[in-house]
Image (cartoon, helix red, strand yellow):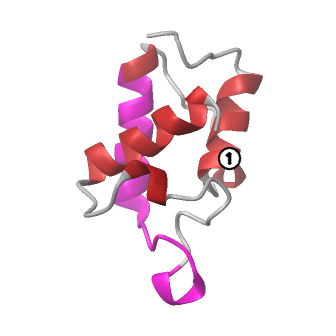
Amino acid sequence: MAQLETLIQNIIVERLMLPIRPEEIEPTVPLFTSDDAGGLGLDSLGALEILAGLSEHYQTNLDDIEPQDLRSVASLAAYLRRRGVESDNG
């Protein structure tokens, strides 16, 4: 798995204090779909925490993010790559 996806998984687990290992979050699993439907079941506060963690890590404002960019680890990574962010920055 790419380093950027690994970084995002780590931020999600650390910021939200999830009782799982970062590598247990599959890159394409929906972050905000309920557990019953195969997602992580995060809420809007979780989205804010993820964005805060990424903003702190990369020292940048992520205010142009769209809802579809928050669907999964993979979509977050794609968003960051479009912005020119690489995993070794920050």
* Secondary element at tag 1: helix
Q: Nearer the viewer, residue 57 or 24?
A: 24
Q: Amino acid at mark 1?
A: Ala
Q: What residue is pinned by disc 1?
A: 74
Assign the magenta stretch its main secondary structure. Answer: helix
Residue 49 % position (x, y): 34, 45
The quadrant of the rendering that contains the C terminus is top left
Is residue 52 part of the magenta span, yes or no? Answer: yes
Is residue 54 part of the magenta span, yes or no? Answer: yes
Taking the spot 35% from the left edge, 54% from the top edge, the residue there is 21
The quadrant of the rendering that contains the N terminus is top right
- Residue 25 lies, with reference to residue 50, above or below; the image says below
Residue 74 % position (x, y): 68, 46
Q: Is residue 89 left or right of residue 83?
A: left
Q: Nearer the viewer, residue 85 or 28?
A: 28
The quadrant holding residue 20 is bottom left
Crowd rating for badge 1 (residues with CA inside 10 Å; few <14, some 14–19, many 20+): many
Instruction: Tally the marks.
Output: 1
Q: Is residue 24 left or right of residue 84?
A: left
Taking the spot 35% from the left edge, 22% from the top edge, the residue there is 56
Taking the spot 62% from the left edge, 16% from the top edge, the residue there is 86
Taking the spot 64% from the left edge, 58% from the top edge, the residue there is 71
Query: What span is in magenta?
Result: 34-56
